[in-house]
Amino acid sequence: MPALPSPAQMPEVARRSLLRGAFAGAVLLGAPALVGCRSDAPAGAGSLSPRRGGNLRVVVSGASTTDDVLDPHLAGSWGGGAVAKNIFDKLVAHDNDLVPRPRLAEKLEPNADGTVWTVRLRRGVTWHDGKPLTAADVLWSVRRILDPANKLPAAADLAMVDAAASRVVDDHTVELRTTQPMADLGGLLAGWYVYVVQDGTNRFDREHPPVGTGPFRFDGWAPGERTKLVRNDRYWEAGKPYVDSVEIILAAEADARLNVLLSGQADIVHEMSYVQAKAEQGNRSLTIHASAVGTFHSFNMFVDREPFTDPRVREALKLAVDREAIVESVFFGYGEVGNDLYGKGAPNYADAIPQRVYDPDRARALLREAGKENLRLTLHTADVTPGYVQAALLFAEHAKRAGITIEVSKSAADSYWTDVYLKRPFTQTSWGSYALEWFYGQALVSGAASNETGWRRPAWDQRFALAMRVLPGDAADVILAKGAGAGTATPAQKAALRAELGLDRPAVEQYLDWMAGVLRGDLGRSSFSGRPVTEIVAARLPNTLVLAAVATAVLVPVAVGFGAWAGARAGRTRDRVVTTVAVTVGSLPEFVTATLLIAAFAFAVPVLPAVSMVAPGAHPLSTPEILVLPVVTLVAVMAPQSIRMVRAQMSEVMATEYVRMARLHGIPERRIVTRHALRNALAPAMPLLAGSVTWLVGGIVVVETVFNYPGISQDLVRAIGQRDLPYVQSVTLLFAAVTVAGYLLADLAVVALVPKLRTAGGRRS
């Protein structure tokens, strides 16, 4: 393979050209995973509030006894994956939108060229045995995955990581170095097998029970039959897990899984067959849920085996299957037609490519041209996933019109993945929904562990490596990555857009130009939408100001009241109680406090809304209940520090000589506190209170996001993701202005509280 060019020399790799031919040996269909749940309640019971606790029994598609393993770096079946996901956790995991989200990692920070990634771990995470999660655990996991002696499938995910050069920086920071620039390490760390295991762990069995950081602890295991897990009370996600224990039951056949459910031995069945779902639609004791992301079903041809080496034969087979008929007859309308490219609906999917349709006449002509008329093939399948066998039989019927005879060979379900898949030239498979870059590394590079089509093209490997090296840059990259023609922009188009946005100029010049506009009252225009920033800010700023004002109106009396009350009796019982509560509540970050409040008052006792929705054109104060949880969260996070500051000042004042003299003169204690001590205690505390109030502005960003409150934070988060510098700079300037104003008001309040500051100038001689 020729040497890769430097990042500065790299051409733009259009996704469409990158993928061309990569799926030459696959015919894809899309279908949701169907889950059935038992319910003894009448129809409509789905609206009832769930109850916390209890034992949840789930029956899933499993592996044979020998293939059912507890090693998360080896467990490839649905059942093994379910066990691994509940015992262990990953640094990063994909959400339902297929976007990686932080889990054990709080931040992933690349250097300028993407060759060094700093992983900062979430603090407060402990293993099931009580040990803290450390960077050494992460580095051990990476090195274990990549150790050639272990022959782990996850090695394909992390092939670009240089395990030897990677290092532990401190207990909560690990530095992962790559053998070449990486654009998105997070997408690979979210791979199926990439779990973090405890430092030094190599065995996972009955004698060496798995110890993880996940929501459940290992309790028992019958290989090939079931695994019992119990609640992890040390779990780092607030309010989870919801149930006390989980029992994961394995059953390879769809009928067997449904029977387990209907007989009362399970509460949930994963991967119902589509025939079963259709038949059970009227069953009032069963609720059927269709996954929003689902799975992708494919027929795979080894492109390096005859007769599939000829692209005309492969194209003929793709034209010889009626996808619409399979969706309707096999998936009973639950699925949708795929287009021979994995990842339909995923971010950056090439959805502009024309849909391939059923055309048996064209397929026959291609076979005639290739000298393969009256083609005979064997399609290997098994009842390992609902719809496999039925889809294979229907494919065989469709292909007859193109002169193709397909013999369907059904293998045993418990040995299909070990004895047939990746060994026979024409098979079936299905994949869950993952980020595209992860799937390509798993199935489409020459050395991929799951290269199910035999696609081995060094030139394509190089282009994929190039695509993985391209780091996102600025607003122009984001804009050109959206809409029709995504990923096809030429360097000239990007250069023109950067010039239009002013991004081609030096950063200092851009900033000075923006500041000049600010002095004229012009905050500029959004790089992304082109709208004036002032207009965007004005649309949501009032909502944020209302939330901040209400929170401040609650915060100040709470801080002053409890701080003065505790400080007036320093060392007494009420002082110790207030201080203990303040320290405890103040130790929780905003998102944890918000989550606890939502769990308590929106779900456990549903008296307040979990999200703060404001009707278009309405004012937040018109529905004050939506402000309660956000305000309580802000106050709970900021009041403890303010209370302690006021308490400290009050304690000092109450120990002064003039307070003792006032007591000796018989002045009532309440009057001493309210008329004398409090004023003098607040004077030095005011700047500190102002700091808390201005810090509230930063806290609002988190709180508005958690509660989906329609303030400026949602736009700010969006702007950061879109590299919309004018908007980010303007909001930052606004926050700075609020901070300055807060301290100014605090200084004025001090002057008002201390008369001698107002008259000091007049006493000079």
Image (cartoon, grey):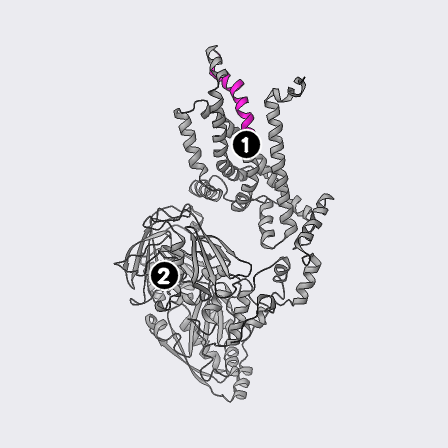
Q: Are marks 2 and 1 in contact (CB under 8 Å)?
A: no
Q: Residue at x 29, y 67 (%)?
A: 66
**Seen from this angle, which residue lies furthest left?**
207
Residue interval drawn in magenta:
667-689
The percent coordinates of residue 117 (x first, y second) are 49, 58
Residue 494 lies left or right of residue 261; in this view the side is: right
Q: Residue at x 72, y 47 (%)?
A: 517
The percent coordinates of residue 182 (x first, y second) are 51, 63
User: Does residue 4 appear in this view?
Assistant: yes
Name the residue tied to disc 1: 689
**Seen from this angle, which residue lies furthest bottom?**
371
What amino acid is at disc 1? Leu
Above or below 227: residue 624? above
Q: Which quadrant of the figure contains the C terminus?
A: top right
**Seen from this angle, which residue lies furthest front?**
765
What amino acid is at disc 2? Pro
Q: Could you say which is closer to the camera, residue 321 or residue 432?
A: 432
Q: Residue at x 62, y 58 (%)?
A: 474
Above or below 199: residue 634? above
Name the residue tied to disc 2: 72
Does the stretch in magenta take in 403? Answer: no
Q: Could you say which is closer to the camera, residue 635 or residue 293?
A: 635
